[in-house]
Amino acid sequence: MCGINGILGNKKNIEENISCMNSAIVHRGPDAEGIWVSDDKTVAFGHRRLSIIELSEKGAQPMTSISGEYTIVFNGEIYNYLKIKEELVKECKSIEFRGNSDTELLLNAIECYGVEKTLKLIKGMFAFAVYEKTSGSVYLGRDRMGEKPLYYGKAAGNTVFASDIGSIERIEGFDNSVDGRVLGSYFRGGYIPAPYTIYKDIYKLRPGHFMVIKPPYNEWREECYWDIRKVAYEGCEHAFDGSFDEASDELEKLIKSSIKGQMISDVPLGAFLSGGIDSSLTVALMQSMSDRPVKTFTIGFDDEKYNEAVYASETAAHLGTEHTQMYVTNEDILEVIRDIPKAFSEPFADSSQIPTMLVSRMTKQHVTVSLSGDAGDEFFCGYNSYKDVRRGLDILNSKMAFVKGKSRKALGSLAYTLGGNSNRTIHKIATSLSVSTPEDWYRNVREDDILLNRLAVDKDQIKDSIDNYFDGYLSEPEHNLMLMDMLQYLPDDILVKVDRSGMFYSLESRIPLLDRDVMEFAWTLPLEYKYDGMTTKKILRDILFKYVPKEMMDRPKKGFSVPLGRWLRGEELGSWAEGILADSRKYLGEYVDFKTVDTMWQNFKKTGEGDRNIWNILMLAQWFAERSMHG
């Protein structure tokens, strides 16, 4: 696990600039630093190392192949690298190895097989850049679901890439302007969807893609090597035809295999344990394959509605793990909140970032690698919202049964005309009337959408990248909703939260459910094996109950949420929020309508409603304030 960056072009003081870029990501790699410059001084790579596999200098980066033809900077882990290494040695007799790192395996595989074939072979989480000496080409690659970040684009007259936007900001002459067109998407979701970022001309390489950049490095070509849409379609077309018990047994084997590969580490390793289905399953399978107690970690809150620490402790005791927990204080919360702009480097406002950062900070005191149960909701139909969509549409259809098809949409348009752009109730009625499918409902019915649409000053907004998906793409609406989340919410919110929160404290987080074989098998499972109309994540529960008694897990889903509204209306965080909002006018006036901000804040103080929207504004304002301090 590391941080990478690079400059392609003719940047003056190229080594000094790479050094500055490296300095911005010391938290991603505190153990060592490396810089490499091509012979013609047109390409430079930087690397910060967090040593996990092959702790010696034989794993140092940037790394050049023995032939001298390829040079790589790599962030992540290749879990099947030992298996590929065996095959590589047999097939490519000329290939030699200095050490035993997955970085060297990746480098040699690219030299032997090429970039695209190598990407299809490897299983892991990764982002990398490879320089090919003969052609001068640079290749960028990112893992299938986007666990590891990779930004690229134009800055200060050069093509650049980095694990963190903060690195790109350190380049001498950086003057990219904020892209106000992305703020509409940000205010609705709390994150900026790929391929866009907060800056113009800076982008995110999309998951499952690689990029070819040829001299003189002014243009690039992006190609897809793995597409979750294709995986979903083919999985549903060739559904698993065995029984539920057979499917459960096969899935258990695949998840165990994934966990076994992800438990390989030359440094101490543990797991997050929230007490929910996914993390409990991950820990249970880890413990079943370990000859010593697994180290597990959780945090607790004094609000019983949000506290899962009690359940996590019960699960840990039953499984026999070495468990550590911490109940957080207001001081802990405020300290972490102030670090959010530094940890995330662009506006990000999923409030579960707070407990994720807190548990990551605590975990790093004991281990360097931690496994988590993320992605269970998206791949196994776990969100309550999936149930609510069909139920809500059924209720609407029954109440509006006397209005059909085009007439109902026409009535919705009339409602907009009569006040849907100014009155919240009319707006919600108009929006509800305008939808006709579960996918429409999932996309378009959002609380306070009328205010969110008014927040961003720039009305030439970039649309969410999933706006046109997926009515009727897959036969089951729930499958379409899951796929929509896999394409945007999972990579752009959940995986960003996990990676940035962990790496800010130099903690590597691994996600076994995102193993390629697990993901591809999950899409072959009939919907009723995941959600039978009553029980979510049915097949994961079936596996878990082999290790943990059902009655221990039989409780409502809480998720990794926090009492945000109560915090922000309390004395300490309320005072902090008031200060941020008061200062934000000098940073945000060009981008945000402050009449709308004031309306939202006053309503929140009176009613406690709209805490998520307020959090979006606060995180944007705090990011601008942090940027101004270093700009």
Image (spheres, helix red, strand yellow):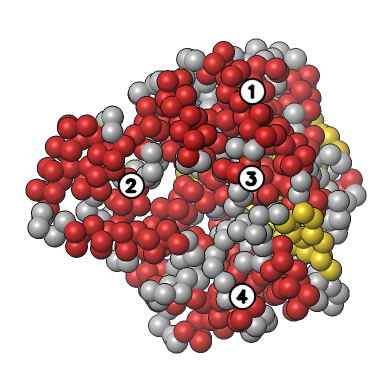
Q: Is residue 586 above or below residue 71?
A: above
Q: Are marks 1 and 2 in contact (CB under 8 Å)?
A: no
Amino acid type of the residue that numbered disc 3 sits on in the rendered structure? Gln
Could you tell me residue 113's position as x and y percent? 61, 53
Cα distance, mark 4 to mark 3? 24 Å
Q: CA distance from mark 1 to mark 2?
A: 32 Å
Image quadrant in which you'd find residue 19: top right
Query: Tag 4: residue type?
Result: Met
In the picture, measured across the screen, residue 237 lies left or right of residue 108, that is left
- Residue at the farthest right position: 56
Q: Secondary structure at mark 3?
A: helix
Task: From the image, tell me which residue sits under label 2.
Answer: 445
SS category of the residue bearing label 1: helix
Rendered view: 551 above or below 17: below
Q: CA distance from mark 2 to mark 3?
A: 24 Å
Measure the C-alpha gap from mark 4 to mark 2.
Answer: 32 Å
Q: Position of residue 610 (x, y in %)?
A: 47, 39
Which residue does the numbered mark 3 point to in the structure image? 353
**Residue at image mark 4:** 553
* Residue name at image x 35 percent, y 23 percent: 459
Q: Would you name the residue on which mark 1 appears?
A: 579
